[in-house]
Amino acid sequence: MQRFGEWVFILGAVIALVGGLIFPTSGQLAIALVVLGAVVGLLNVTEQKANNYIVAAIGLYLAGVVGIAFGPLNNVPGLPDLGNRVTDLVKWLAIFAAPAAAIVAVKSLYTLSSKK
């Protein structure tokens, strides 16, 4: 099952990156990434890795929301809208990571509240 979870993560990351470039506004892509992200959250993230995963997911989310960080890349000669494309890719990665982070957070809350 561990190998399956690893492949789901790789598949989700590739779909987020490639699909985000080809279909930057696709609802179907978003649904696929949410489902794959949920599978990753259920299968891959152990209790020991929970904090690191949640922090990384928050970092992706903030980088996607604060897209102005990549704005200067729009001025690279010969690559118009590069900053916007990078922002889109980070947003798609965040969409993939968000459901896993939510599942990991709920699992962590359960663990914290059930142990004495």
Image (spheres, rainbow, N blue to C red):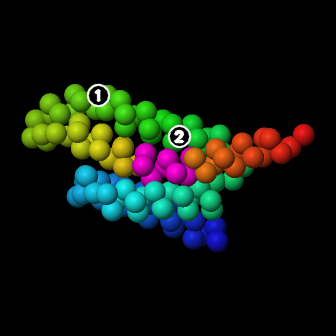
- Which residue corresponds to mark 2? 56
Residue 110, compared with residue 23, is above or below; it is above
Residue 97 in magenta? yes
Whether residue 65 appears in magenta in the rendering, the answer is no
Q: Main secondary structure of the magenta part?
A: helix
Q: Residue at x 45, y 53 (%)?
A: 96
Label whose residue precedes the other's in the sequence (1 or 2): 2
Q: What stretch is highlighted in magenta?
A: 94-101
Q: What residue type is labelled 2?
A: Ala
Amino acid of disc 1: Ile
For label 1, the residue is: 68
Whether residue 49 is visible, yes or no, is no
Q: In this view, does 84 lie to the left or right of 58?
A: left
- Circle 2 residues within 10 Å: few <14, some 14–19, many ≥20: some
The spot of residue 39 in percent (x, y) is 56, 62
| Quarter of the image where one finds residue 3 | bottom right
Number of residues whose C-alpha sits closer than 10 Å to that of mark 1, classed few (under 14), some (14–19) or many (20 or more): few
